Each structure stands twice: as C-alpha cells, then as structure tokens.
Image (spheres, rainbow, N blue to C red):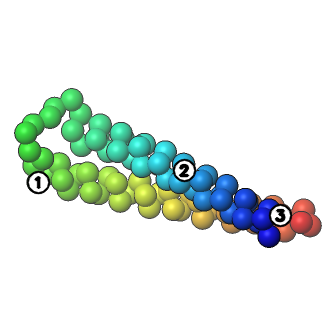
Amino acid sequence: MDNSKSIEDAQNALGMMIYQILNNQVKKTCFEKCFGQKFSEEMGKNEQICLAKCMDRMYEAHTIVTKASNEISKNLNTDSGY
C-alpha cells in the first residue's frame, strides 16, 4: 500500500509540473501573439478577446494531444501483450 501511495504522489507531482509548464508556455505564446512589444496601461477589448481565444485554443490543443498520446500508448501496450 505504501508503494502505491508513493507512485500516486509522484504522478500528482508530475501532473502539477506539466500543468505549470503548460501554463507558462500558454502565457508566453499568447502574450507575444496578442501584445507583441506594445504594452499600455489597460488591456483593450481586442487584447482581452485575443488572449482568451488564444488560451482556449492552446488548452484545447493540449487536451487533444494528451488524449491522442494516451490512446497511442494504450494501443501499443495492447499490441505488445502487456
């Protein structure tokens, strides 16, 4: 039981690290796309919309890639008899 707890803790820590990396990359990519090198005192309506749509697309893409990767991994394990 202690071993499964350690594995679960490691999986949770890995999940948090992946989430942080994804979050940082989304912010970097979307801010560069929506703002470039221009910054103002307030975020305009266009920047808000751009940022929201960009972040939505990035997270949706991550979800799709994760599902596809899991499916491929599952198929490989099934094909190899594991």
Mark 2 vs 3: CB contact within 8 A: no
Q: Amino acid at mark 3?
A: Asn
Circle 1: element type: helix
User: On the picture, is 37 further left or further right than 69?
Assistant: left
Identify which amino acid the numbered label 2 is placed on: Ile
Question: Residue 39 at x, y = what percent?
Answer: 14, 34
- Residue 18 numbered mark, or none: 2
Q: Secondary structure at mark 2?
A: helix
Residue sitting nearer the eye, 4 or 26:
4
Give the spatial CA distance, label 2 vs label 1: 30 Å
Q: Residue at x 54, y 48 (%)?
A: 17
Query: What number of labels is visible?
Result: 3
Q: Quadrant of the C terminus?
A: bottom right
Q: In the rendering, at what x and y percent does residue 33 appear? A: 29, 40
Residue 37 placed where, x, y %?
A: 21, 29
Q: Please give the name of the residue rendered at 29% of the width and 37% of the height, measured from the top-left corner.
A: 32
Residue 24 figure quarter: top left
Q: Are marks 2 and 1 in contact (CB under 8 Å)?
A: no
Dot 2 surroundings within 10 Å: few (below 14), some, or many (20 or more)? Answer: few
Query: What is the number of the mark on residue 45?
Result: 1
